[in-house]
Image (cartoon, helix red, strand yellow):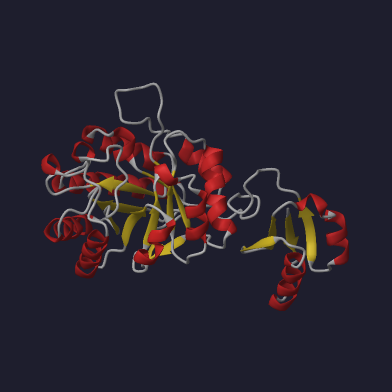
Amino acid sequence: MVFVLKLGVSRQSIEQFVGKIEAQGFKTFLSTGTEHTVVCLIGNTSTIDLNLVVETNEIVEYGKRVTEPYKAVGRTVHPEDTVINVGGARIGSGMFQVISGPCSVESEEQIVMVAKAVKNSGATMLRGGAFKPRTSPYAFVGLHEEGLKLLLIAKKETGLPIVTEIMNQTQLPLFEDVDVIQVGARNMQNFDLLREVGRCHKPILLKRGFANTIEELLMSAEYIMAEGNSQIILCERGIRTFETATRNTLDISAIPLLKHKSHLPVIVDPSHAAGIRALITPLARAAVAVGADGLMIETHNDPANALCDGAQSLNLEQFDELMKDLKGRITYENKQMGIDQ
């Protein structure tokens, strides 16, 4: 249920209205747009008499029930695009960003070398796994706390904000200096973890699970936002289908559909979608063409000897070529949409 407030309502009046609603046991989400302020009620609103609320609160223009199961992440509540600021890099509503780095942090020399190279090529955020969820318990699972320290060294050397994956809620204190916390595909429906990252004040990169629907992805984002954190970046990274020629199947239609249904920025991870180095560039082009807000690209200084996912990683020269290719395409797409960047 949402209530659209009248123009020119004072902050004090809004707080009083919200306080009255929350006193009934509901959580609220406030969306302030250029024209109207919208108050969204989160919870079982079947007991609320919508017309009575409108009639007895002079600051309310009108109210309506939200039919989608996701409330706060939907465009009904928040019609304008959300733009998220990560260390000065703004993502969403035409602000396109590229996140790049190795699948796993392997050494200080490696992560600093890659960070400097991808920044020089135009990446605006550094990715790198410190904790790695692996199918096999015998595979390299990351350097853990040491990996986080090395990421911070690379951040100090380059100024790039860092993006890295959390495995469970007990690790949250370790992520104090991380700029963007990634919730990976395997944890997309780890609801305890979603609630915990929802209580922190950091941007969250939420990846779609490889067997999950778009509605399930949005409901997972709703878990985060229901706890008060609206800084969510959605990531399409491919889903599992009957096709075996690629690691996953990139659901390219998910990008415009997500942007139609939600105000949150949407990025694409073509590396995990394809699992094949040669497909990363064409899939990245496709992501730009359908309106993605950014890309996450795996880049390694020596993919042939990478400890994790070398086959789907670009080398430094290939990433540089990709960025040169994308710059012209991103500029063109933004002009087509009337966006200055």
265 or 180, which lies in front? 180
Point out the image quarter for the C terminus: bottom left
Task: Please provide percent x and percent y for residue 60.
Answer: 79, 64
Give the image quarter of residue 226.
Answer: bottom right
At x 15%, y 61%, the residue is: 108
208 or 330, which lies in front? 208
Q: Is residue 79 visible?
A: yes
Residue at the extreme front of the image, as rendered: 137
Q: Is residue 9 visible?
A: no
In the image, is 106 to the left or to the right of 135?
left
Task: Please provide percent x and percent y for residue 110.
Answer: 14, 55
Task: Please provide percent x and percent y for residue 241.
Answer: 41, 25
At x 28%, y 46%, the residue is: 297
Give the image quarter of residue 126.
Answer: bottom left
In the image, is 85 to the left or to the right of 130?
right
Give the image quarter of residue 152.
Answer: bottom left
At x 70%, y 43%, the residue is: 67
Task: Please provide percent x and percent y for residue 98.
Answer: 32, 52
